[in-house]
Each structure stands twice: as C-alpha cells, then as structure tokens.
Image (tube, grey):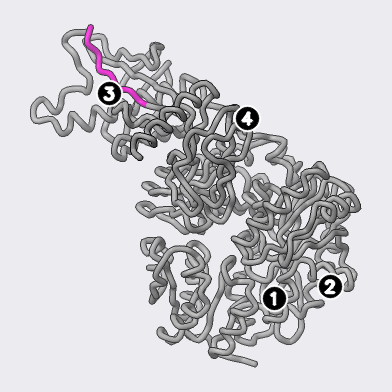
Amino acid sequence: MTVTIKKLLVANRGEIASRVFRTCRAMDIATVAVYSDADSGLPFVSDADEAVHLPGNAPGETYLRADLLIEAARRTGADAVHPGYGFLSENADFARQCAAAGLTFVGPTPEAIDAMGSKIAAKELMREAGVPVLPGAVFDSRSEPDAGQLHAAAAEIGTPVLVKAAFGGGGRGMRIVHEIGDVVEAVASARREAASAFGNGTVFLERFVESPRHIEVQIVGDQAGTVVHLFERECSIQRRYQKIIEEAPSPVVDDTLRAQLCQAAVTAGKAIGYVGAGTVEFVLDASGRFYFLEVNTRLQVEHPVTELITGLDLVKLQLDIAAGAPIPDEVSQAQISGHAIEARLYAEDAAAGYLPTSGDVHTFEIAAVDGLRIDAGFASGTRVSTFYDSMLAKVIAFGATRDDARRLLAGSLARARLHGVTTNRDLLVAILRSGEFGAGAIDTGYLERHPYGELVPVRADDARAVHALAAALAGQAGRRRQAAVLAGLPSGFRNNPSAPQTASYELNGTAVEVTYRFDRDGLTAAVAGQPVPGARLLSATPDRVDLVCAGIRRIVAVTRIGTTAYVDSPLGHDVLAEVERFPDPSAAAHAGSLLAPMPGTVVRVTAAVGDSVEAGTAIITIEAMKMEHTIRTPAPGVVTALPVSVGTQVDSGTVLAVVEDSGAAEQDLAVGDSKEDKDD
C-alpha cells in the first residue's frame, strides 16, 4: 500500500527527534514535536514546525502515554508517527494504536515487534530459523523463583551467568553472576529494575561469553518482503552494558566473517517479515564464533556510522518504506567506503562509577570541521534533567581509514568546550587515544580491564598550576574592569611586594591557594605553596589569559559562572570552585553521613535506625535515569539517622543516612531517646 506522508510527529525527544526533523526538512515533510515540562527549552522543540506540550516529566506521564501522543498527532493534523528509539519505539500496541487512528507508523509491523519483544521467544524463533543462539533459562514476572530453581538453572548453564531483562535493553535489568550463590540476589535486583524500566520483570539466564565482541548488523526490509543488510557495526566499548563508542566497519571482521554475519542477519529479518530499518545483534567470541543476541526493531542510536560509510540516509529510507516504496538499488548495492566512529557524550561522572549527572549546560561548543558530524540534544544554556537518559550528543567522525576517523574524533572532543554538568569527555578521548583501541584489540570487558584512573591519569601539578593561576588572573581582570578607579592598572599590582593577591579554589576536592603579585620585576606567583617558574603575563581578560610559564606560552580560556571557573587549554580542562573565606560551619554534614551521589528517587531502604552494620552493607537504593544505585556503608558502625524514606526525591549531596562507630552511636541514640522522652 502506498501513502503520502505530509506531516510527521516524532514521539520522542532530544537528539533523535532533531535528527528525524533534519531529514524531514530535506523531504519537505512538515514536523511536530512533543515535549515534557523538563524538555521545554531543548533544541528539538524549536527544530520542529509545531510542538505539543505533554504536561509532567516522568516518562510514564509523557513520552510513554500513547493516548497523548496520538491526540497530539490528531490536533496538529499529522498523518505519520516516527517513534525514534527507546520509549514506545518497540511497543507493538502503540504501533497498532497508530494504525487504528489512521496514522502511518514509521517502523516494523506490530507482529514483528511482538516476535522480538520477548528476548526469550526471539531466541527460540532464531534457533528454528538456523541462526546460532546460546542456551538459557527463563523466569517470568508472575511469581518469584525460589533459590533452588535459580541455583539449578545457573549450575546447568555454567558460570559466569548473564541475567538479562526479557523486555527492554540499554543495560537495564542486566547482571553478571560469577558465583552460583549470588544468582538469587542478582535475579531479584534485575527483576526490580526491569519492572521499573519496562513494566515487566521477566528475566532470562544464559551463559555469559567471556571477553566477547558486540557486533551488530543493520538490516532494511520493505513491504514486498525484500530484506537486505548494510554491513556490520562494532559496539564493544561499553559501560554498564551500554555502548559508548561504536564504529563501522568492525576492525576484526574480515570478508568471510562479514558474509556469514550479514547472511544470518538477513535470515533473522526474513524470519519475522521485517519491514523498515532494524538491527540484528550478535556476540562474537574469541574463536570467531557468533551467537544471536536480539533484534532491535527500531533505528539504533549508532545508525550514523552506517550512514557515513554507505552514504545513505536511514531516516529517509524509513520514511520511504513506511510510505510503501521498495528498497532502491543504491541500498541493495551499497558498498563500504571509509571508516566511521561514534562517541556518545554523556552527562556522567565516569570517575565515580559512571554516575549520571544533571544540571545546567553552561557551554556546549564542539567546533565543526570536515568529516565531523554532531547529533546533539543539548546546547549552551540548556539543562539536563534527572528524568531521562543523560546522553548529551553523539559525535561522529568519518575518515578514509580507521586511524583517520579515530584521530579526528579524539582531537575534536579534546578541544571541545563543555561547561556545567560533568561529562565523560576525558574518558572517551583517553579510549580513542589508547594503544589497544588504536590496534582494534577491544571487547566488552575493555573498561573492566582498564579502570578510569588508569586510562585518565590525574593531570600533572604544573598543568593544574597553570590553570589555577589563569583562573585567578582572569578573575582579577574581571574585577579590575568593574573598578571605579584605576581600572587600567595591571591585575594584582602592588607597591608593597610583601602583600600579594590571593585566591582560593577547590579542585577535585582539594583546596588550592594561588598567590601572585606584579611589581617592578614582573609577575611572581605560587600555587599550593609552589612557585610558578618563569611566570609572565602577556594579557588577561575575564575570559582569556595569555600566559607564559616555564618558558612555554599558552592561551587559556576561562569561563566564569558564579563562583566557578571553567578552564580550557592545550593542557586539558579543569573546574575550579572559589572557596568561601568564611564558610557557614552549620552547613557541614554530620560525621558519618552517607550522601546522595546524584539526584534521584529513593526506591528501597534496607536498614533501620539502631541497626549495626558491617562495611559494604546496602543501606539505601536510589533510582536515577531508570538505573538503580545502591548506597553502601564505607565502614562498620551503627545507623543513627535515616532522614529519607521510599519515594523521597533527593538532590545530589542530600544526607541519606548517618552511620557512626559504635561508641559515638550509643551516645547519640541515648541523647535522641532522652529528647523523645522530654517531648512526650
């Protein structure tokens, strides 16, 4: 059946919505965005011709409300819906509701989505079709499996065992079990997380392949039953089971293996009558054997690398196929040209275990250069909320060779100006510049073998000194510019050489004092008590310092937001928070306080006031951006305070519990008891 798409509603948000709108503009298709309260200021809203507000913030009251999305399409006169990825993109009922409302759903049929919606049923179907799969066991959401069942299943499969949510993806509801005795807690935790993220707590167990590579194949099918492939992508660099660097083609796949993988993917697509753009995912072991993982019945986050090596627009292809067009020759005859690598830039603290971060994006600037593509969901002046995935942008580099693409991407990220929320930029650059990645010697355990501190060493003291001094000089330049008298006097000039200027900062949790003065001999400076050799200031404005240290001249960019200085130079990037000279002592947290590492919602409290706990005991679990984060005790003691309960919304730094050593705890609890008696 052939239709004409005139106006498209994108039932999604962020960078994927903007990406779809970009193709629609080229095709002269009118566009409609939908947005939550938290997303009202993001670029995708203004990228659309029209936008409809979805009141609220939680996905369950906004982007997961099929009725509101279809009503938005009706009100704006849209005749088609693109689901993007995530949210309702793999929801067969939503596809059916769109069809019932007379809307063209830009995606596969509901039957294909149903067939792949359960990873369990999908594996059985693939086994019957002749696609290699791993053995496993299933535990549905209707009842809690007992310990005996779980232990028996894990023993039969053999360790390590992968526990995985049957409905959903993105690393949520996944655990790896190395000891059979740990399987009960792993399954319980995975079921809770899966139920929260996907509405279904069914999980399955299967043998975990050690040090595998994650390889996926892009497929495209049309309504006439034709299914073709567009080669493979390598997605092995992952953290928390989520991809952060993807590339095409894979550096390990040769022509023979490529033919086998792609044929298996086409077989999988034909087995379910696939229509539209989809992805068949495989795990590749060290011997070169591959096994089916799942079919993603949607456009993938990493689709740009396939577009760059084939020269095709996958969104245009989706729209054309949804309108009834056959697969064109340029798709069925596509060839690989060059190499593309994508890095997912997240708002997260990689050094703290990849904790998602939220807050204001003060500056988001990545220079546009030939061969670089930026699919961004945020811009300078926007805000990252706690309600959705924390990806800021996808930065994709294309080159004639893999090394060309790798170098372009690493350099572009390293020179970007990213201020406000903490990002994983330094980690991405370190991976791209590492010898193993350069040689293509990667697998899904790469970041387990190479912890953050090994990949991203702390910058040398002399680099920190240059940044701290530059921040102090830029700050004084700003104050001198506002001075009522002698505004042109060099910042820090003193007739009395015994009275230097001082500035105090916090840098990565450490207090750093800067002292400097200008006198007849020039600039004399020290950082953290250490003299800065050969310091010479050529010029300083509030946002740019031209500075010579130890005979090397550098331009240091300084962006000041409130009392925080964001510093960028060839030496790297630092954030220096000015320290209050007279801080309020009452603001300090009580000794033994366990603080929230990120904003989120308390979903579980597993201790009570008065409990004696060992080091590592789970006290509270927070859910943030659909991921669970468990807060554990750093040392043995007694719980003396629990100021939060299940359902409490907390900000980063909120006191969740207080755990004191036994002696102090007995004293505090006794005082608390006497206070309660007095109040009664």
Q: Which residue is mark 2?
A: 125
Q: Main secondary structure of the magenta part?
A: strand
Label placed on residue 581: 3
Earlier in the chain: of badge 3 and badge 4, it is 3
Residue positioned 74% across, 40% down in the render: 439
Q: Quadrant of the C terminus?
A: top left
Q: Which segment did they paint magenta?
A: 498-505
The image quadrant that residue 611 belongs to is top right
Determine if residue 83 is in view.
yes
Q: Which residue is mark 4?
A: 615
Find the distance from the CA under tag 3 to the CA under tag 2.
67 Å
* Local SS, label 3: loop
Find the distance from the CA under tag 4 to the CA under tag 1.
46 Å
* Local SS, label 2: helix
Q: Quadrant of the N terminus?
A: bottom right
Residue 618: % across, % down: 61, 40
Residue 335: % across, % down: 73, 65
Earlier in the chain: of badge 3 and badge 2, it is 2
Earlier in the chain: of badge 1 and badge 2, it is 1
Three-letter code for the amino acid on which mark 3 is drawn = Arg
Give the class, few, some or many, for how many residues have Cα within 10 Å of label 1's Cα (few <14, many ≥20): many
Q: Does the magenta run of residues contain 499?
A: yes
Find the distance from the CA under tag 2 to the CA under tag 4.
46 Å
Give the class, few, some or many, for how many residues have Cα within 10 Å of label 4's Cα (few <14, many ≥20): few
Earlier in the chain: of badge 1 and badge 3, it is 1
Q: Which residue is mark 1?
A: 113
Earlier in the chain: of badge 2 and badge 4, it is 2
